[in-house]
Image: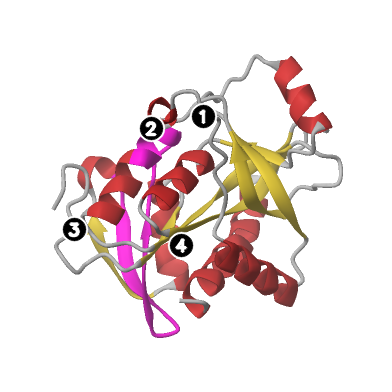
Amino acid sequence: MTIHIGAKPGEIAETVLMPGDPLRAKWAAEQFLDNPVEVNAVRGMLGYTGTWRGKPVTIHGSGMGMPSLSIYANELIRDYGAKTLIRIGSAGAMQEQVKLRDIVLAMTASSLSTPSSGMFRDLNYAPCADYGLLAAAARAAQKRGTPTHMGGIYSSDVFYDERPDLNEQMTRHGVLAVEMETAELYILAARYNCRALAVLTISDHLITGGNLSSEERQSSFADMVEIALEAGLEES
C-alpha cells in the first residue's frame, strides 16, 4: 500500500491504462477485462486489475490535471512496478482536419508548466511517447478503420483557458489537440525508463464548437480502450 493506492503487492499489473475519471476506469474494466477485481478505492480513485486475452492489465484512474496524474503514476511505477502506462482520455481538437470521435495518438506533449518543470530549471524539456507503443497503436487503429491522427498535443494546467493568443499559435504550429495530463506522464516515463503513450478521443472541437453527446462518447471511448489494450499488451 502507498499513501494514495491501497493495492497489495502483486495486485497491479505491469501494463496500466489510466483514464482521468475513476468511474471510466470502472466502466472500462467491466467492459473489456476478464475477471476484473477492484484493487484501489482510496479517495474514490478506483483501480481494477483483470486480464485481456489472458494477459494481466490494470485500469486505474489518474484524476484531472497533471498534479493528480503525477501522484498516481509515481506510485504505480515506483511502488508497484508498472512498466507501461497508457493514458486513455478525451481531448479538444485544435485543427480543422481532426474531427469529433477521431483518435489522436500523442507523439509529443507541449506545456506551459508541469509538476516536473522545476527540476529542469532553464531547460525546455520535450516529452515524447514511446515509439513502440505509438507504432502498435497506429497499427491497431488502422486495423479497426478508426480515423486517427499522430502528432503533437498540448497539455494544459487549466481547464478554463483565457489565452486565445496561445491557442491561435498552437493551431498555427500544428498542435492537434488539448488535454490536461500527457506531458507529465511522458516526463515520468522517461525518468523511470518506462513506456508511455496517450490515446485520446476527440470529444470537443475548439474551432467548430462541436461536442459529443454522452451516448457518442461511450461508443467512441470503446475504440480508444481497445486500441490502447492492443498496443500495450500485444507488444509487451
Where is mark 1, residue-wise?
123
Where is mark 2, residue-wise?
67
Residue 65 shown left or right of residue 145 in the figure: left
Pointer 2 local density, CA inside 10 Å: few below 14, some 14–19, many at least 20: some
How far separated are the C-alphas under marks 4 and 3?
18 Å
Closer to viewer: mark 2 or mark 4:
2
Q: Quadrant of the C terminus?
A: bottom left
Viewer-proximal residue among 229 and 190: 190
Pointer 3 local density, CA inside 10 Å: few below 14, some 14–19, many at least 20: many
Q: Is residue 160 visible?
A: yes
Which residue is at a point 53% across and 36% down the rendered structure image?
Answer: 125
Closer to viewer: mark 1 or mark 3:
1
Where is mark 3, residue-wise?
7
Closer to viewer: mark 4 or mark 1:
1
Q: Position of residue 228 (x, y in %)?
A: 54, 65
Q: Which mark is residue 28?
A: 4
Residue range corresponding to the magenta coloring: 45-70
Q: Which mark is residue 16?
A: none
Three-letter amino acid code at the position of disc 2: Pro
Three-letter amino acid code at the position of disc 3: Ala
Q: Are marks 4 and 1 in contact (CB under 8 Å)?
A: no
How far separated are the C-alphas under marks 1 and 2?
20 Å
How far separated are the C-alphas under marks 1 and 3?
36 Å
Viewer-proximal residue among 9 and 100: 9
Which residue is at a point 26% across and 49% down the rendered structure image?
Answer: 75
Label 3, secondary structure: give it. loop
